Image (tube, grey):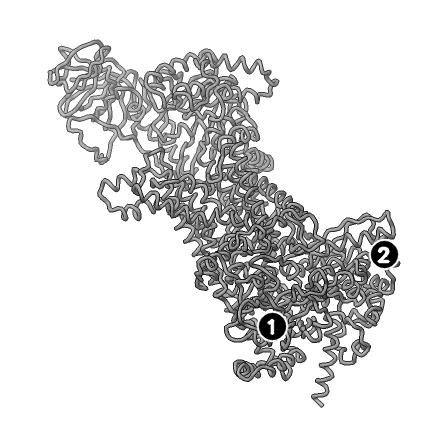
């Protein structure tokens, strides 16, 4: 065997190489395999190294007496020092509670609405369905600000009275206003659309025969729900957990505003004088991300197959809520969604006309003198107009520069992440059993599962050295955003490619249609709606991302940091105005894309 | 030009052998059908030739070009193999009209030169006319019926005028009448285009009627590769005999030894004595010796292969085909046969060789009769056994009617029960 | 003997504190001594080292410190014409000051032009950013405007990332010389002061009232606003601890008894931490404060809250200048609040003063221009106008401060049009002198902060913060 192959082994190798690279999906897998490996591993290595480095002016210098070099003192102090409980265990526990709580709220609320919309005859389903997505469109902490504006009170939080306190004199208890409960409620509401879309997708396609079969066998309703319906929805629930858990863990602004100490907020606060220990916190958050991925892998294996429930058509039996019931339930949802979706927007708009931030004089007096358009129209910042030296939104270069920056980052991220993700999804679908393909897919997915703030921290450390210093550049933001959001596209792309019969492409291969043309003329047009959502999701998410970019740029660089800056400063008129700009932008883009391609947002988030 | 040759082609997924050491030559201008029950490896074979599937090992040549050779790492991608492929599910591009579906491939032709718009238009209209879809050129696939979609797929495949055309059960989704119609269309196309056709089907009728040669496979192994009538008349083994032919062949278990004159005295059908007279000269003993030697050689080769690095044992093992003997009390085949000797034989009698007459040698009773007008299929009960026969013309039989019967002609087949293979053909006389 | 050494050290550190912390305003000869003997251990190495040991930028700084505005401007024009100037700072106003600076250079050479970018990093990122930038041979940033003396000292100055440049005119105005200045160059002092809403019945006449049972002051969280933590550090310095003690003794007996237990309990901690005799008063106040304040994200929301009618009896410690932007309405009025220190009979600390410092980066790409810009901001009223136009920021240059007051009249900022009728009492800024004297403003001393950051600092971290 050997001597037969010996003489032309190199030729054989060459041939094999040629064969390997003649398949576009192999090229894609190899290329992006290397890319995602580097972009995923390198930041982790950088942040690992940081945990052992000595940072001048911080605790490790104080404890070791050295100004440079390496030490394990950060680990020792974090885990065993007298601050271990305050700096590590309590935040860790809070983080886990927050992440779990967020998943529970998102799944219960999103699942319930999904059920009501798809499986009952509730009234106004269409309205509720579209309005329900809104909290995801808005930056997550805006809901936290709304929460505060609703429930804060002089008596409990020592601030000015919120709406509930000033209108009805109701002072909500402290646990309701600050800490874990409001944080997980706000994040849960924010991520509920995920659960709604994923679970709703299954409800919508689920063959009602399955339930009907059980009904005919005279199974009690609750038993049907637990033994038939719930197992069917399980994959969607798992997907939701997969998508939400890491995101909730890594959220910085919500716990920051609502006064909950989590690993993310602790990371930020410890960064000044316990820098190395803060990096350890980031690593702990990353470990959670990896763990979730492994759990997901295991659950996939035990399920054997990737396909969820397809079901051809099947009459969906709708639960009858009764003539009055269907309106009562709908009304309840309308009220809830009013507060999660409409009220924020209305209050944002209103806020931009108040003379002072949070000054609702107009509501008490009805006197239009207590309203102003100065926040929009002031075109100079020399005379003091109670605007803290800022020009009005319409004339504020800083805001519009940040807006352009955000658009640049979002569009670039969306195009790059969308393209790469789509290609990865395509390549993996062509090589479903390949080990390398699965590796590439998982490697590409990993950054998504890692908390944003930790990813941001890792990228900051990676790109802040004597050779490359990308801090506060759009390049850095785009790189980070792309890495983080590839999974949106790769996931939707893989799922849609798997639905596409291989013959469709083979028919074109046989006719010697070049790969590019196969993609652009056949595959992408057929699966355009889910592929477009693979582009839209990074765009939308990027537009309002804060946790990820928080550590990577200065505060006027992009809209979300500008927005957060104004929110922290208490200039709610500006932050509200920016919020409106963001929401309008997303709606405009969504409508445009919808009109141009027929694809819509609530398709294919997870597929 | 395009003669296709497969040498030791094997495809396996882990331990499962989809195609096992297949050697096959498809002559130019042939119409070959790959036939076999589902899962036998015929579609895999086709896809490997087309390049859509990569063999685990072996060598494939199309014309004078080696398109695949595992030894030297050659694997020409499908688009460079210059073949046409008709998919089972049509694989029409739903986002394109019929016209676009057909023309899309043509716009990619670069050799010898790019086609002009006019040329493409001409071709589209020509092939559309051939398959009678000229009226639907502006429609989308979803707006067509199954048969129409099928024809679009054919038109799309034909348009670039491939010299080799592969078809993967193209008619399986059509209703019976349309299938019959399309079958003759295909035959005509084969003649008109002069291309080499390779056609996968599990329908033996389709294979028989269309092919110039049938390649019958089972469990990834080639069973017989011959002209349809050869496959029908001289089946290589029990499996082939059973798979081809409708109504199915009658298997009659026999026990007997060869006489000095070459005839074989056998006991069949519960003790009835009969004589099998081979067509040509035959020495059973020699035949067995040869067969055993061949089997031993095969075993040796296999052992050698098994010793090599990277060999994976076939999990889907090959076994001798378990033929079915029809009985009145159709008891379950227990699968226990005891030890078979050289005297254990099986005689295969095609239904048309069963002769019902006034003075046949054996008595039977009509068990069932199914007249179609052109012919009547009858099942005759002999003792506990059932024999199927075909009688031409509109003869009416009463159920239970006594008849006498004989075995006609000298194309009755003698198989070894031990290895399931054909020994010879000849005539069978009841004593 | 011991007492005398202590006293000597104390007075020395006080002087250094004043000098280093925030530029002295009124050059009183006795307060601007030559580097005192006791100051030796805090002498920074780069201050008076032999010339040959200086880095390239330090040499330029040395040269520049002897130059007049015209000389320096000429160097800057030569260096940076047509280039881009990158600055980074905690104050966004650097962005407003730069165009004025460019105009000033244009006035000298009309052909001069320079583009600029001013970055304002979030949270504590400015230190990471400068550290990372400091690794390069030639940095991106030419200079910085930065706060938090504690971290500046440990992360920036001791590591050699930043260099101090003392403009000649500034030294002159303060009656000193560049070589004699041992601290950093402050652009301005900002003050955070105690304010309370007066719509309720409560009054606050003593700084101990703010930590009394049931009180929850609004304050930026000390983990996100590090200068807030520095305020607490500074309280432990003996002179400020003594202020607290004095205020405590001014309390009526019943109130005293409320705090006495806590103060006594702190005695051992104070000696463990190496604090002075009155350290226990400081620790007690700190403990009560940390365990009671209601954390807010910024001074903006605190201000918004306090000026509203509904915030009866609430109080906070926040940047004084926030008041400038409050608009009058039915619900909101600047007259809804009192600045505690302005009240007659108020006892104890009135707030906290910290500085914006100016530095040239040690790998500055445009060191001459950086020096010129710093010169312009600290030595001309135009240069300071980006900050000077608003109340609550006091230039470290007495001449500039005087000129600014001349132009903007912050001391009568609360008067109505006629200039004599008090419209908004709280907006009559009593000025730096009053605040550092009668107003008992606790001033940040970077070196003191750095020295206790991990002693007092860790002690503070162990306290349980108030959480709703």
Which is nearer the eye, B277 or A521?
Answer: A521
User: Is A368 positioned to the left or the right of A380 in the image?
Assistant: left
Q: Which mark is residue C73?
A: 2
Q: Residue A434: percent from the left, percent from the top? A: 48, 41
Q: Residue C426: percent from the left, percent from the top? A: 65, 66
Tag 2 subunit: C
Crowding at dot 1, Cα within 10 Å, few <14 / some 14-19 / many 20+, comes out as: some
Of mark 1 and mark 2, the one earlier in the sequence is: 2
Residue drawn at 78 percent across, 58 percent down: C383
Crowding at dot 2, Cα within 10 Å, few <14 / some 14-19 / many 20+, comes out as: many
SS of the residue under disc 1: helix
Q: Quadrant of the C terminus of chain B?
A: top left
Residue drawn at 52 percent across, 32 percent down: A595
Q: Is residue A182 above or below residue B153?
A: below
Q: In the rendered structure, are the residues bearing label 1 and label 2 in contact, judged by CB atoms less than 8 Å apart? A: no
Q: Is residue B47 above or below residue A357?
A: above
Tag 1 subunit: C
Counting every numbered tag in the picture gives 2
User: Is A215 positioned to the left or the right of B128 in the image?
Assistant: left
Which is nearer the eye, B110 or A68?
Answer: A68
Which is nearer the eye, C450 or C66?
Answer: C66
Residue beneath disc 1: C457
């Amino acid at each position: 065997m050997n001597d037969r192959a010996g003489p032309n082994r190199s030729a054989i190798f060459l041939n094999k190489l040629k064969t390997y690279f003649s398949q576009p999906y192999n090229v894609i897998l190899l290329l992006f395999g290397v890319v995602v490996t580097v972009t995923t591993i390198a930041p982790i290595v950088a942040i690992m190294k940081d945990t052992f480095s000595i940072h001048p002016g911080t605790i490790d210098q104080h404890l070791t007496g050295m100004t440079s070099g390496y030490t394990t003192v950060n680990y020792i102090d974090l885990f065993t020092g007298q601050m271990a409980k305050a700096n590590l265990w309590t935040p860790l526990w809070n983080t886990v509670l927050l992440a779990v709580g967020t998943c529970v709220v998102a799944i219960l609320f999103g699942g319930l609405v999904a059920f009501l919309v798809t499986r009952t005859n509730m009234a106004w389903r269409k309205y509720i369905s579209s309005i329900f997505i809104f909290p995801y469109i808005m930056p997550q902490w805006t809901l936290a600000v709304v929460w505060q504006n609703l429930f804060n009170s002089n008596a409990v939080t020592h601030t000015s009275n919120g709406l509930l306190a000033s209108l009805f004199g109701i002072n909500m208890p402290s646990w309701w206003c600050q800490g874990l409960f409001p944080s997980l409620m706000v994040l849960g509401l924010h991520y509920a659309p995920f659960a709604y879309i994923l679970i709703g997708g299954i409800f919508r396609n689920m063959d009602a025969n399955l339930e009907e079969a059980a009904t005919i066998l005279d199974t009690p309703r609750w038993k049907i729900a637990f033994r038939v319906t719930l197992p069917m929805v399980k994959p969607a629930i798992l997907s939701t957990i997969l998508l939400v858990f890491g995101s909730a863990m890594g959220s910085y602004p919500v716990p920051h505003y609502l006064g909950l100490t989590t690993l993310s907020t602790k990371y930020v606060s410890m960064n000044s004088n316990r820098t190395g220990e803060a990096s350890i916190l980031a690593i702990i958050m990353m470990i959670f991300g990896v763990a979730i991925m492994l759990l997901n892998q295991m659950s996939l294996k035990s399920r054997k197959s990737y396909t969820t429930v397809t079901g051809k058509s099947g009459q969906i039996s709708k639960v009858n809520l009764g003539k009055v019931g269907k309106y009562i339930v709908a009304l309840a949802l309308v009220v809830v969604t009013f507060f999660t979706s409409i009220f924020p927007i209305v209050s944002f708009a209103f806020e931009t006309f108040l003379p002072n931030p949070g000054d609702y004089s107009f509501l008490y007096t009805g006197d239009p003198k207590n309203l102003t358009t100065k926040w929009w129209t002031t075109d100079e910042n020399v005379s003091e107009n109670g605007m803290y030296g800022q020009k009005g939104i319409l004339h504020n270069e800083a805001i519009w520069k940040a807006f352009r920056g955000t658009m640049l980052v979002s569009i670039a991220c969306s195009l790059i992440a969308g393209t790469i993700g789509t290609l990865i999804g395509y390549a993996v679908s062509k090589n479903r059993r390949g080990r390398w393909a699965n590796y590439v897919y998982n490697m590409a997915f990993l950054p998504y599962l890692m908390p944003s703030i930790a990813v941001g921290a890792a990228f900051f450390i990676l790109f802040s050295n004597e050779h490359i210093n990308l801090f506060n550049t759009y390049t850095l933001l785009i790189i980070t955003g792309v890495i983080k959001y590839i999974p949106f596209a790769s996931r939707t792309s893989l799922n849609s490619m798997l639905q596409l019969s291989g013959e469709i492409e083979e028919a074109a291969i046989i006719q010697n249609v070049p790969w590019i043309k196969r993609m652009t003329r056949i595959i992408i047009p057929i699966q355009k709606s889910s592929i477009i959502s693979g582009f839209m999701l990074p765009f939308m998410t990027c537009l309002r991302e804060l946790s990820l970019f928080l550590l990577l740029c200065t505060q006027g660089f992009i809209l979300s940091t500008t927005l957060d800056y104004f929110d922290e400063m208490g200039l709610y008129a500006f932050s509200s105005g920016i919020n409106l700009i963001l929401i309008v932008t997303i709606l405009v883009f969504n409508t445009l894309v919808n009109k141009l391609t027929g694809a819509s947002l609530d398709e294919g988030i997870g597929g | 030009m395009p003669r296709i040759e497969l040498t030791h082609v094997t495809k396996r997924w882990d331990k499962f052998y989809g195609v096992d050491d297949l050697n096959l030559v498809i002559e130019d201008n042939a119409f070959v059908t790959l036939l076999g029950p589902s899962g036998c490896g015929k579609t895999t074979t086709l896809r490997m030739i087309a390049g859509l599937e990569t063999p685990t090992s072996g060598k494939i040549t199309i014309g004078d070009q080696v398109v695949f050779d595992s030894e030297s790492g050659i694997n020409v991608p499908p688009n460079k193999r210059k073949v046409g492929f008709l998919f089972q599910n049509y694989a029409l591009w739903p986002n394109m009209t019929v016209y676009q579906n057909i023309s899309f491939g043509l716009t990619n032709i670069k050799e010898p030169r790019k086609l002009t718009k006019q040329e493409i238009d001409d071709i589209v209209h020509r092939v559309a006319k051939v398959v009678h879809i000229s009226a639907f050129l502006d429609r989308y696939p979803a707006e067509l019926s199954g048969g129409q979609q099928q024809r679009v797929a054919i038109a799309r495949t034909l348009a670039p005028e491939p010299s080799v055309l592969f078809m993967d059960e193209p008619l399986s989704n059509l209703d019976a009448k349309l299938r019959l119609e399309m079958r003759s269309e295909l035959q005509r196309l084969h003649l008109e285009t002069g291309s080499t056709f390779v056609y996968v089907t599990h329908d033996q009728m389709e294979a028989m009627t269309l092919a110039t040669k049938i390649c019958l496979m089972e469990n990834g192994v080639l069973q017989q590769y011959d002209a349809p009538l050869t496959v029908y008349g001289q089946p290589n083994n029990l499996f082939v005999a059973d798979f081809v032919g409708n109504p199915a062949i009658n298997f009659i278990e026999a026990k007997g030894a060869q006489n000095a004159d070459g005839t074989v005295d056998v006991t069949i059908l519960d003790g009835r004595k009969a004589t099998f007279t081979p067509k040509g000269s035959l020495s059973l003993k020699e035949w067995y010796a040869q067969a055993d030697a061949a089997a031993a050689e095969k075993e040796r080769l296999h052992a050698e292969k098994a010793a090599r690095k990277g060999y994976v044992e076939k999990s889907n093992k090959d076994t001798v085909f378990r033929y079915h003997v029809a009985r009145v009390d159709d008891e379950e085949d227990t699968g226990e046969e005891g030890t078979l000797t050289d005297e254990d034989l099986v005689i295969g009698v095609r239904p048309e060789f069963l002769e019902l007459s006034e003075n046949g040698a054996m008595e039977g009773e009509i068990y069932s009769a199914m007249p179609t007008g052109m012919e009547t299929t009858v099942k005759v009960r002999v003792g506990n056994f059932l024999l199927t026969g075909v009688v031409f013309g509109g003869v009416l039989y009463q159920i239970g009617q006594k008849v006498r019967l004989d075995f006609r002609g000298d194309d009755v087949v003698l198989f070894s029960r031990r290895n399931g293979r054909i020994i010879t053909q000849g005539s069978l006389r009841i004593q | 003997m011991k007492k005398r050494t202590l006293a000597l050290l104390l007075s020395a550190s006080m002087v250094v504190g004043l000098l280093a912390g925030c530029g002295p305003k009124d050059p009183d000869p006795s307060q601007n001594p030559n580097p005192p003997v006791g100051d030796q251990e805090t002498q920074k190495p780069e201050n008076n080292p032999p010339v040959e040991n200086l880095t390239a930028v330090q040499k330029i700084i040395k040269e520049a410190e002897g130059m007049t505005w015209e000389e320096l401007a000429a160097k800057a024009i030569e260096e940076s014409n047509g280039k881009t100037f990158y600055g980074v700072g905690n104050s966004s106003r650097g962005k407003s000051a730069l165009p004025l600076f460019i105009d000033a250079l244009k006035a000298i050479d009309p052909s001069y032009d320079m583009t600029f970018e001013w970055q304002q990093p979030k949270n504590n990122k400015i230190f990471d950013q400068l550290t990372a930038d400091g690794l390069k041979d030639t940095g991106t940033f030419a200079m910085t405007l930065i706060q938090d003396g504690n971290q500046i000292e440990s992360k920036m100055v001791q590591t050699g990332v930043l260099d101090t440049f003392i403009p000649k005119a500034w030294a002159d105005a303060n009656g000193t010389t560049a070589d004699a200045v041992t601290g950093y160059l402050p652009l301005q002092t900002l003050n955070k002061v105690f304010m309370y809403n007066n719509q309720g019945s409560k009054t606050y006449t003593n700084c101990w009232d703010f930590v009394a049972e049931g009180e929850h002051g609004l304050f930026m969280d000390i983990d996100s606003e590090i200068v807030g933590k520095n305020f607490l550090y500074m309280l432990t310095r003996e002179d400020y601890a003594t202020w607290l003690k004095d205020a405590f003794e001014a309390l009526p007996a019943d109130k005293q008894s409320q705090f006495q237990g806590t103060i006594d309990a702190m005695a051992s901690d104070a000696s463990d931490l190496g604090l002075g005799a009155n350290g226990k008063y400081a620790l007690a106040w700190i403990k009560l404060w940390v365990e009671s304040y209601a954390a807010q994200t910024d001074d903006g929301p605190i201000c918004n809250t306090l000026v509203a009618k509904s915030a009866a009896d609430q109080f906070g410690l926040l940047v004084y200048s926030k008041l400038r932007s409050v608009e009058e309405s039915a619900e909101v009025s600047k007259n809804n609040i009192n600045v505690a220190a302005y009240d007659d009979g108020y006892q104890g600390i009135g707030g906290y003063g910290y500085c914006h410092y100016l530095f040239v980066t040690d790998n500055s790409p445009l060191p001459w221009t950086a020096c010129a810009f710093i010169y312009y901001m600290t030595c001309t009223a135009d240069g300071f106008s980006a900050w000077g136009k608003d109340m609550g920021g006091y230039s470290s240059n007495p001449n500039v401060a005087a000129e600014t007051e001349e132009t903007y009249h912050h001391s009568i900022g609360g008067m109505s049009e006629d200039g004599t009728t008090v419209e908004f009492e709280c907006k009559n800024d009593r000025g730096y002198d009053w605040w550092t004297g009668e107003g008992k403003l606790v001033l940040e001393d970077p070196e003191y902060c750095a020295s206790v950051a991990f002693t007092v600092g860790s002690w503070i971290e162990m306290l349980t913060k108030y959480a709703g």
